[in-house]
Image (cartoon, rainbow, N blue to C red):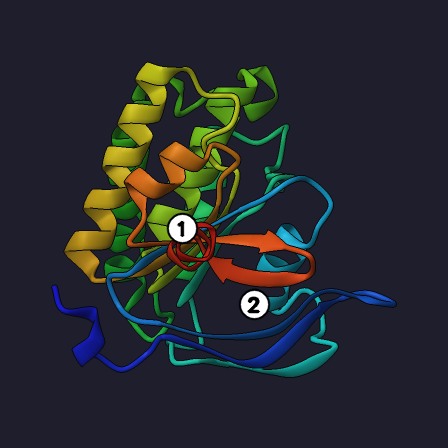
Amino acid sequence: MNHANSKPLVTLNNLSVGYDEPLVSKINMEIRPGEIISIVGSSGIGKTTLLRTIAGLVKPLEGSINLNIQPRGGLGYIPQKLGLIRHASVAHNVGLGARAGTSFKEDPATWWKRRNQRVNNAINLMGLHDKADEPTRRLSGGQQKRVATARTLAQQPQLVLADEFLSELDEDNIDVVVRAVLDYLEESNAAMILIEHIIERAVEISHRTFSVREGRLTELSDLRSEQE
């Protein structure tokens, strides 16, 4: 797909993020439907804060964020702290995502059918069909990551924000999760911004990869040009 010909889903204008002091400043970026953006860099330099700011969980210090997505269910967030209900089942947790992405204007029978289809499809995509009735507290860390990813896919968002969503997964599970997410993004023409600590993986998954260096967000291609 030619991303340049579509209207941006996300526009960041002179954005600075942080708390008392800026962690990353003067971010200007457009992200279009179907595009995958990755952000790499060492810990504690503002990557997660940037994601949380785009998600509306942290107020920008300067600049603006324009999200061209539907107000209900348009943004899906997979945080590092997964926010799962540990005593509830896998199906219940994934159902929360499906609930966020369906309209209450539908008649109850149609709404419930659509919700259940989304839950079952997402659970199957993540290879968790045999764990659907298990409380999430009984699952491994990697399985809980897959539950959180399934919850987001069940929501069917236009924009996915993923913070280290492949950590704690072995290579076989990484392949399953990446394929499922990439298939969803392609089929729905959704965009994704992900934080990834392995640069090679970030480059392989993404259309564009950025690094946070000295408080600025710089595309890796630009960094390579500076070093040549």
Residue 200 quadrant: top left
> Which residue is at a point 34% across and 48% down the rendered structure image?
154
Q: Is residue 127 above or below residue 109?
A: above
For this rendering, which residue is in front, 227 or 202?
227
The answer to whether 92 is drawn above or below residue 35 in the figure is: above
Residue 169 vs 89, above or below: the answer is above
Q: Amino acid type of disc 2?
A: Ile
Q: The N terminus appears in which quarter of the rendering? A: bottom left
Name the quadrant containing residue 122: top left
Residue at numbered disc 1: 228
Q: Secondary structure at mark 2?
A: helix
Residue 110 seen in this snapshot: yes
Rounded to the nearest angstrom, the CA distance separating label 1 from label 2 is 33 Å
Q: With 56 as the anchor, is 224 left or right in this view?
A: left
Q: Mark 1 or mark 2: name the one nearer the start of the chain.
A: 2
Crowding near pointer 1: few (<14 within 10 Å), some, many (20+)?
few
The amino acid pointed to by label 1 is Glu
Mark 1 vs mark 2: in front: 1
Q: Quadrant of residue 95?
A: top left
Can you give x and y, in whole percent of width and height, for residue 59 in the image?
72, 73
Q: Report the disc number at residue 94.
A: none
Q: Is residue 95 left or right of residue 119?
A: right
Give the answer, above or below, for where 88 lies relative to 211: above
Horizontal side of residue 26 vs 178, given as left or right = right
Where residue 5 appears, x then y in whole percent? 17, 79
In the rendered image, residue 191, in percent from the top left (x then y), is placed at 32, 61
Residue furthest to the left: 1
Q: What residue is disc 2 on? A: 54
Q: Residue at x 61, y 21 (%)?
A: 137
Residue 119 in sight in this render:
no
